[in-house]
């Protein structure tokens, strides 16, 4: 990671959703010879974080049987049906006590570029409690969330709760510019087809 000093951080990949809009578990969609979640995990592991956590829930049995989880810590998000924030709440106790915070990744977003991680790392080292990436076409994941946020994060509810924290103005926030488009994720079949076409 390009930074003035090293940052000890955890990667949190949230992959506990039920894929209601898609109609089947998007974590298990075929992608690059494996599954979509396999591709996302492989990309995140390539960033060499001190720890990588993956939350599962909606498709937990299939994910456990199909996806290579050998390089990650797995957390079962027991309340995955109440939004993405439940994955964060479930994962907080599993985060390495030495980690200064975590990078929040989407389990259906396999092509996050390294330059996003590098830029967020610089912001984290500079003291940002929350940092997000401003891509050419909008703001997107991954996010940086510092350990100073953990108490607040532990009280989260709902699907867009982290975005609400970002917009609240209560925390030291950084926006980092990355000259790329927001990495594709998958909510619908059209999204999946676009991702396949881009690979």
Image (cartoon, grey):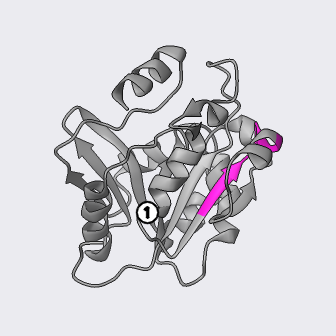
Compared to residue 169, the image places residue 139 above or below, namely above
Residue 79 visible within the image:
no
Q: For this view, does 144 lie left or right of residue 21?
A: left
x 71%, y 60%: residue: 74
How many labels were placed on the picture?
Answer: 1
| Residue 56 falls within the magenta-colored stretch | yes
x 55%, y 44%: residue: 107
Image spot of residue 148 (x, y percent): 48, 73
Q: Which residue is mark 1?
A: 46
Question: Which residue is at the front of the view, 123 or 151?
Answer: 123
- Magenta highlight range: 53-61
> Which quarter of the rendering shows the N terminus?
bottom left
Q: For this view, does 12 lie left or right of residue 67?
A: left
x 50%, y 28%: residue: 186
x 37%, y 47%: residue: 112
Q: For this view, does 61 lie left or right of residue 116?
A: right
Question: Which residue is at the front of the view, 158 or 67?
Answer: 67
> Which quarter of the rendering shows the C terminus?
top left
Q: Secondary structure at mark 1?
A: loop
Question: Which residue is at the front of the view, 57 or 157?
Answer: 57
Q: Residue furthest top?
A: 190
Compared to residue 104, the image places residue 24 above or below, namely above
Crowding at dot 1, Cα within 10 Å, few <14 / some 14-19 / many 20+, comes out as few
Residue 133 visible within the image:
yes
Q: Residue furthest front?
A: 33
Q: Residue furthest right?
A: 61
Image spot of residue 11 (x, y percent): 51, 63
| Residue 104 falls within the magenta-colored stretch | no
Compared to residue 125, the image places residue 75 above or below, namely above
Image spot of residue 35 (x, y percent): 60, 38
């Amino acid at each position: 990671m390009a930074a003035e000093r090293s940052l000890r951080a955890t990667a949190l990949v949230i992959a506990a959703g039920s894929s209601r809009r898609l109609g089947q578990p998007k974590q298990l969609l075929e992608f690059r010879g494996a599954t979509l979640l396999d591709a996302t995990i492989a990309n995140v592991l390539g960033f060499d974080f001190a720890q990588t956590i993956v939350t599962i829930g909606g498709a937990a049995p299939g994910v456990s049987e199909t996806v290579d989880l050998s390089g990650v810590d797995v957390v079962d998000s027991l309340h995955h049906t109440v939004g993405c924030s439940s994955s964060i709440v479930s994962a907080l106790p599993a985060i390495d006590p030495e980690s200064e915070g975590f990078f929040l990744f989407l389990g259906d977003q396999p092509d996050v570029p390294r330059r996003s991680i590098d830029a967020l790392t610089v912001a984290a080292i500079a003291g940002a409690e929350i940092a997000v990436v401003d891509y050419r076409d909008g703001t997107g994941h991954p996010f940086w969330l510092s350990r100073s946020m953990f108490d607040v994060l532990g009280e989260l509810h709902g699907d867009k709760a982290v975005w609400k924290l970002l917009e609240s103005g209560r925390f030291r926030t950084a926006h980092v510019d990355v000259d790329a488009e927001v990495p594709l994720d998958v909510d619908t079949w059209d999204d999946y087809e676009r991702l396949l076409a881009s690979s």
